[in-house]
Amino acid sequence: MLPENLKTIQTRIAVTLFIAQSFTSAGLIAMATLMTIVATDLGGSEALAGIPNAVNNLAAAPAAYVFGLLWDRTGRRNGLALGLAFGILGAGVAVVAVQTGNFALFLGAMLGLGFARSASGLSRFIAAEVNLPEVRGRAIAYVVLGGTVGAVGGPLLVAPSSQWALAAGLPELAGPFAAGLGLYLLGTLSVWLGLRPEPMTIARQLADAVPVAERPSETPRPLGEILRQPAVIAAILSISLSQMVMIGVMGITSLHMRHHDHPFTAISLVFSAHTLGMFAFSVFTGRLADRWGRFPTILTGCLILLLSFAIAPISVGTPLLSLALFLLGLGWNFCFVGGSALLADQLTPAERARTQGFNDVFLGLAAAAAAYLSGLVFAAQGYGLLNLYSALITLIPLAAILLWRRQTHRAQPAAQPIH
């Protein structure tokens, strides 16, 4: 039986997740802003600059699957709070690593931060499962929108937190990590205090409210069976490979601009355009996914990504690079929100945490591969070929959603709407 105040509960859960996402994304971006500089200083070589980010993503991958299994036992509130608490630990270890100049310890800190980032990413599915399919896209997008706060607030914290660190007798570069510790603490507390009642209970009540004739079997399918479904394949590829190409091109663009003597102000402008595309239109994207459908949303995202990869190599000028990076962020947003909603649609409550955790394993591995390989491709073959390879990778989710659409049309009457 559904609670009478269901709408209020759904709003409270969404707001709590938005607040937690805002705090943790601000902390993550503040730390990421100086990540390569810290890695170079501690490791003593620019060749090591991308290693911490790769370790972070590699840690996030298996953590996503473990959290997916764990959260069905602990509940979403306890599980998410535990996951974000790893961010507190990781940021604290990073401060010590910077203070002692210990590169190995700094890599250890990336493990904790990777676990926390994995948990934060999975929180979008909590928003999805406490809502009906027709509004899941908006619910997911609202949580993703919390990243806008991080995109704006994270970089703004770098300078003042560095000054605070100096005033406290710490190295200047430790400041953003100390700020990250505080922000992850606030995110963990917001989940612990605000994520009530237990979202998993609400999800099950929603599932029970579906008429028996329309209700899926309550027996969870084996993971292998779920992963053979065309819609699930299309969703996972859309989420993971859009993340892969976004990280690969985004991470190298600043180095590409430095090679062409762009000032830091120009690089900041390009990245501001990118983060605007990534997060600012999330609610709009979510509404499109609900009203327009999952397929058109993901298709549009893939086409926007392809346009970005065509524009980026044309000129090293700031205006065109800003446009290309804006489109890169926007295309990722369409694929990420549309794919996440599509994946949530395919799963029963008993299947969600495990399958969504597996999805984010693939997501983390794809991101780690992009962080590592993009530098090698750029160094050996240049920025143009990096964008070409990214375009070719984007054709994979594009083909997957077209195949899913074709099979769905064959299986259902033409008059029946398809999400």
Image (cartoon, helix red, strand yellow):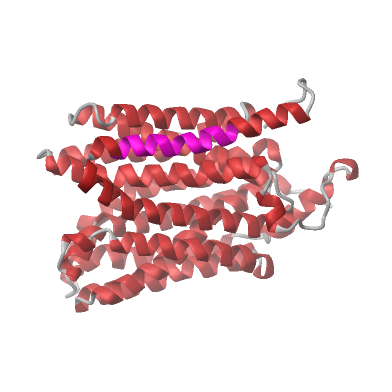
The residue at 28%/37% (across/down) is 385
Res 98 quadrant in image = bottom left
Q: Position of residue 94 (x, y in %)?
A: 30, 71
Residue 406 in percent (x, y) is at 67, 28
The residue most toward the top is 415
Q: Is residue 383 above or below residue 167?
A: above
| First to last magenta residue range | 386-401
Q: Residue furthest front?
A: 380
* Residue 329 is at least partly visible in this image: yes
Q: Position of residue 73 (x, y in %)?
A: 68, 70
Residue 241 on the magenta segment:
no
Residue 219 appears left or right of 32 = right
Viewer-closest of 388 and 69: 388
Q: Position of residue 417 (x, y in %)?
A: 73, 26
Query: Magenta part mainly helix, strand or loop?
Result: helix
Name the image quarter holding residue 158: bottom left
- Please, which residue is most extreme toward the bottom here? 100
Q: Is residue 400 magenta?
A: yes
Residue at the far right in the pictured view: 213
Residue at left 41%, top 35%?
Answer: 392
Please name the residue shown 61% across and 64% down the image: 77
Picture quarter with the C terminus:
top right
Judge left or right: residue 205 versus residue 248: right
Please state which of residues 65 and 229 is positioned toward the viewer in this rendering. 229
- Left or right: 52 with respect to 84? left
Is any atom of residue 282 visible in this view?
A: no
Judge by depth and name the residue closer to the eye, 312 or 274.
312
